Image: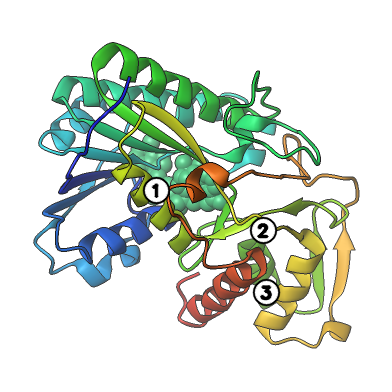
């Protein structure tokens, strides 16, 4: 089944006050064709300073509420055309001690979002899934049509369940969905992640850097501005009612290389910092140490990734150092 052009002007960002959401807010409000942007967020990791610069823009509204509250979510969503769904537990390692967290703060939230869309007749969902849906494939490059998929973390399982729910609602209830399997996303206003941890730790203690695993974990780090471009481009695409897209750089950096970059961005002499590796091939239970992601599908729509993993990581860490000096980190 296919879907025609949308010409959307009213966007509803679930989890919009967080890191990635704040960049969608910037990009959408910079566009003439956009009449309304609503952020729906419980501020568990969202921050007011992420959208302060738009406080005077009458097109922006902020609803402080929780996606668990379906009634409130439905009322706030009414009148919008496109949902960008970004709310979930951001901490993959948390499930080792709280196994239900990715169901409660992942799968269930996505069910509420599509239910609210069904009640309000909202047409399109753009869903922040993740490369975690592919599980642990080692050096094998993951393509969107690969299957069966075997998650190795409850985070990956909740993203996979969210995608399945969106596909089913698209076929049963007339909405359309694009789901995005991002690599690691980095950039200004980041709220978590390996670069974020390294910068914070080095600012705290410039002589020793604890590193989870053996430092050889190797993944793609995509700049948030490239992610926003990919998602909004796929939103314009006239194609199937449900379609997954991988979004990653096509190149990879190791955790040890990120540590070296963090030392440089914080302005330290490399000889003065001791790395303390916890050992083992992965950082935590459910971590996927090697991630390889095929990106031909999104590139075939005309998407150009403007930053390599290394450039994206450097820009992100320099901005974190700046935020820390302003007391924002
Ligand atoms: N950052 C990455 O590297 C990355 C990679 C792949 C996928 N993703 C996905 O992209 C999405 C956004 O990630 P991010 O890095 O911006 O994280 P983030 O934590 O900065 O943003 C998530 C936002 O959702 C809000 N939220 C969480 N639970 C909520 C609830 N129950 N009700 C209302 N609001 C709630 C938080 O307050 C926060 O503002 C997440 O779903 C994440 O899994 C992120």
Q: Earlier in the sequence, mark 1 or mark 3?
A: 3
Cβ–Cβ under 8 Å for marks 2 and 1: no
Q: Which mark is residue 194?
A: 2
Q: Locate the N terminus by quadrant.
A: top left
Residue 172 x, y percent position in the rendering: 30, 11
Return the residue found at the far top.
172
Looking at the rendered structure, the secondary structure element under dot 3 is: helix
Q: Residue at x 51, y 81 (%)?
A: 322
Q: Which residue is mark 1?
A: 231
Q: Residues within 10 Å of mark 1 (few under 14, many from 20)?
A: many
For residue 149, say whether it is visible.
yes
16 relative to 101 in the view: left or right: left
Q: Is residue 216 above or below residue 103?
A: below
Looking at the rendered structure, the secondary structure element under dot 2 is: helix
Q: Earlier in the sequence, mark 2 or mark 3?
A: 2
Pick whichever, 276 or 260, lies toward us. 260
Q: CA distance from mark 2 to mark 1?
A: 23 Å
34 relative to 151 in the view: left or right: left
Q: Is residue 83 above or below residue 253?
A: above
Residue 50 x, y percent position in the rendering: 34, 64
Residue 295 x, y percent position in the rendering: 58, 46
Q: Which mark is residue 204?
A: 3
Looking at the rendered structure, the secondary structure element under dot 1 is: helix
In this picture the colour scheme is rainbow
Q: Residue at x 38, y 15 (%)?
A: 168
């Amino acid at each position: 089944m296919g879907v025609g052009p949308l010409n959307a002007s009213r966007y509803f960002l679930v989890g919009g006050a967080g890191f990635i959401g704040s960049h969608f807010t910037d990009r959408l409000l910079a566009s003439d064709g956009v009449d309304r942007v609503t952020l729906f967020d419980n501020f568990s990791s969202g921050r007011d300073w992420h959208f302060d610069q738009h406080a005077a823009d009458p097109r922006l509204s902020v609803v402080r509420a929780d996606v668990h509250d379906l009634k409130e979510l439905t009322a706030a969503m009414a009148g919008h055309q496109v949902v960008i769904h970004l709310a979930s537990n951001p901490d993959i390692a948390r499930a080792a001690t709280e196994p239900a967290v990715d169901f409660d703060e992942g799968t269930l939230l996505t069910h509420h979002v599509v239910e609210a869309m069904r009640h309000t007749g909202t047409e399109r969902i753009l869903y922040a899934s993740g490369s975690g849906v592919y599980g642990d494939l080692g050096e094998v490059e993951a393509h969107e049509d690969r299957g069966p998929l075997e998650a190795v973390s409850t985070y990956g399982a909740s993203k996979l369940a969210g995608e399945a729910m969106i596909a089913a609602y698209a076929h049963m209830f007339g909405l359309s969905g694009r789901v995005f399997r991002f690599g690691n996303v980095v950039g200004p206003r980041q709220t978590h992640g390996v670069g974020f941890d390294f910068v914070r730790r080095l600012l705290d203690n410039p002589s020793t850097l604890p590193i989870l695993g053996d430092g050889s974990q190797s993944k793609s780090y995509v700049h948030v501005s490239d992610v926003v471009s990919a998602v909004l481009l796929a939103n314009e695409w006239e194609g199937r009612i449900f379609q997954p897209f991988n979004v990653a750089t096509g190149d990879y950096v190791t955790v040890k290389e990120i540590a070296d970059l963090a030392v440089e961005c914080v302005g330290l002499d490399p000889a003065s910092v001791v790395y303390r590796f916890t050992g083992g091939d992965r950082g935590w239970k459910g971590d996927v140490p090697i991630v390889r992601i095929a990106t031909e599908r999104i590139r075939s729509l005309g998407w150009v990734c403007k930053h390599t993993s290394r450039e994206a990581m450097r820009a992100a860490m320099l901005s974190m150092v700046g935020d820390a000096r302003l007391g924002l980190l």
